[in-house]
Amino acid sequence: MAGRRVSMLDVREMVRRFKLNQSDREVARDLGTNRRSVSKYRQIATGQGWLDRLDLPGPGEIELHLATLSPKARGGFESSVEPHRTRVVELRARGVEVMALWQILKDQHGYAGTYSSVFRFVRRLEPPTPESFVRVETAAGEEAQIDFGFGGKFREPGSGLVRRAWVFVMTLSYSRHQYAELVFDQKVETWIALHVRAFESFGGVPQKLVVDNLKAAVVRASWHDPEVQRAYRELAEHYGFTVAPCRPETPEHKGKVESGVHYVKRNALAGRDFGDVNAANAHLVQWVLTRAGTRDHGTTHEAPLARFHQAERSCLLPLPAVRYEPAVWKKVKLHPDCHVVFEQAYYSAPHRLVGQRLMLRATRDRVEIYFKHERVATHARATRAGERVSNYVHYPDWKLAGFLATPVRLREQARTVGDAAFDLVERMLSDKPVDRLRAAQGVLSLSRRYGPARLEAACRRALVFGEASYRTVSTILKKGLEHTPLPPEAASRGPVPKTAAFARPIREIAEGF
């Protein structure tokens, strides 16, 4: 016992030897301690009346009394804070923190010890109450736990770039059989696709998923972001499972997968070189079926894969007849150009919703836009960033006409007005060096104000003078000149030359002199 603290059993043995009338020297020699300690405990035993009793004091009685002694009295080292015990107890009862308590002892009582000494003293005064947990075992097929975290760096197929990868681990709580896969991103669609592949590898679906408060952004957002939450709930509805998110910092709630990522990294991936991430994932498939699946599990003491096939696989929910198509939900805003933005591409929605917050649902090939749970637009998904996917009916009528203006449509519209209008528009559109599409559209728009008959007459007059332009036709209509008689030479020789188109007759000139 030399050099160590005297325990309750040591004291009880001393009392037994005192009652046998052994001397302090004999007791110290047999127990390997010094005579001063033996003498001190003889005094304690005498004072407590232990030597006058027929029986030995119980362990609890001895321990209770020893707890009242200072470390020095027990044969140990006394804390430098011990002289201030009463003051420390008083300040702690008033809620003073340890750091502040140390400062008070220094300032008011001249204490020269360290903060660590005060902290250890308070820790002994107020030992923490240990927490206890109950291991909960679930029935076969009832639950699976998920872990998702950084899995290391791997080479990307094709590009050859070395990128950060994330490993997804789903462990069935009953059998401990698992699914593991490495991916390069944390997108919602990736997270959901991993679930689909895990269910298909098991050949069924557990009734409940316990999802960690994971570091991966997508999952951390799941319980606070309605976009991610909606996508995950849609997956749960399709497969029929329920979701039980773990509270933060409660690893005991997910103990069966708590070290899932680390276990995969240390046992399946560590020390091995892979050509790329596909090779690593192929190795993971075999590792799950051989090494991880056939090991003697430390808790069940059975091979996870054997336990899975014997008892759990038949208890899983059946896979749906139709494979789930991963979908992403995102809250978007309809901008004044009647388009929303999703993954750097643009999709149109009805102009009446400009400025409104909409919900967008995207699958691999399709994009749907919803307003208050009503689908208002459906598009094929864009194939590149910057692409605009539009439906013309989403534009307002007064903007649609200009947007849809094409040479073919303008010629068709001009033909409904008349031959002169068609000839004038044809001449304008045939002017190759200049894009006169908008000008031709402007000419035809005059029919809404002046009517087709007046527009046809104005076009005929403009052609006579060789002026196939919006400005000329508009001026003729504004001044009401479309029915003014044409010069006689226009009927016999065709259009009047521009140099003479508006020349005054020689008679008027002569009369002016």
Image (spheres, grey):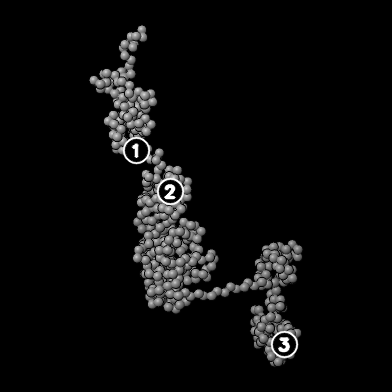
The residue positioned 33% from the left and 9% from the top of the image is 510
Q: Which mark is residue 50?
A: 3
Distance in Å between CA atoms under marks 2 and 1: 25 Å
State which quadrant residue 266 falls in.
bottom left
Q: Which mark is residue 405?
A: 1
Q: Amino acid at mark 1?
A: Ala
Within-10-Å neighbours for mark 1: few <14, some 14–19, many 20+: some
Q: Is residue 466 above or below residue 283?
A: above
Q: Mark 1 and mark 2 in contact (Cβ < 8 Å)? A: no
Quadrant location of the C terminus?
top left
First in sequence: mark 1 or mark 3? 3
Distance in Å between CA atoms under marks 2 and 3: 86 Å
Q: Amino acid at mark 2?
A: Val
Q: Is residue 413 above or below residue 267?
A: above
- Asked whether 38 or 150 is in front, the reply is 150
Residue 259 image offset from top left, x and y in percent: 48, 69
First in sequence: mark 2 or mark 3? 3
Q: Which mark is residue 187?
A: none
Q: Which residue is mark 2?
A: 341
State which quadrant residue 185 falls in.
bottom left
The residue positioned 67% from the left and 65% from the top of the image is 98
The residue positioned 40% from the left and 58% from the top of the image is 327
Residue 136 image offset from top left, x and y in percent: 50, 74
Element type where label 2 sits in the image: strand
Q: Which label lies toward us, 1 or 3?
A: 1
Element type where label 3 sits in the image: helix
Q: In the image as oriented, which residue stretches furthest toward the top?
A: 513
State which quadrant residue 363 falls in.
bottom left
Q: Is residue 113 above or below residue 511?
A: below
Question: Is residue 69 among the parts visible in the rendering?
Answer: yes
